[in-house]
Image (spheres, rainbow, N blue to C red):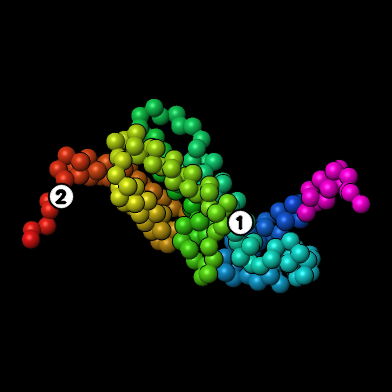
Amino acid sequence: MVMAPEATDWREARRESARHAIVQTAWALSRELGLAGWSIRDLARRSGITTPTVYAYFESKNAIYDTMFGQAATEFADRQAESYDDADPRGRLLASTHRFFEFCSNDPPRYQLLFQRTLPGFEPSAPSYEPAVRALAKAGEMLAACGVTDARHLDLWTGLIRGLVDQQLSNDPGGDRWERLLGECVDMFLAHCALSVTDPPRQPEG
């Protein structure tokens, strides 16, 4: 028997709605108990369903984390891709770092899932990771507009900014102690990159 397309679409919509509700509950538990602090049983109880029902929608806890990762990565990529008022490349770069700070500090579990690899054994799938690749490419474009094109400088940039975010979340949650350093950080970074281009490091003496 061939099922009518309308019935198939209705069932699929219902399934996606149920999956979405489970993931939203997983986020709520992660914000209360930490990313690794909840179990499938906790999730089922909070969702008002049975544990087998959770497994009917997700094959494992890591599958739930993968959906959460893809959702968060898409939110991040979309936020970073929004237009900027400042026409100056340096100004846009600084604005993007403030966006990053806001995105991370507003939801620490989301930041931990995307950037800190706090879940042993979890690796996002390629489809879930793709938005993160897109966001990194956007960062590369903004740096290139400032004259920064060396791949190692992109690594340096992400390390610097994430380091400031880590300090902020660890030592001044809800404040702006490290966020106030962003302008100085951008200027130091761009000056360093310019120096690396005009005065490359010496070769080691043999």
**What's the CA distance linking mark 2 and mark 1?**
43 Å
Q: Residue at x 50, y 56 (%)?
A: 114
Q: Nearer the viewer, residue 202 or 35?
A: 202
Instruction: Single out the residue that lies furthest toward the left.
Output: 206
Task: Using the rendered view, name the quadrant where residue 183 is placed.
Answer: top left
Q: Does 91 sit left or right of 69 as displayed?
A: left
Magenta region, residue range: 1-15
Residue at the disc numbered 2? 201
Q: Looking at the image, is 111 positioned above or below residue 83?
A: below
Residue at the disc numbered 1? 68
Disc nearer the start of the sequence (2/1): 1
Q: Residue at x 39, y 37 (%)?
A: 141
Q: Residues within 10 Å of mark 1 (few under 14, many from 20)?
A: many
Q: Secondary structure at mark 1?
A: helix
Q: Secondary structure at mark 2?
A: loop
Dot 2 amino acid type: Pro
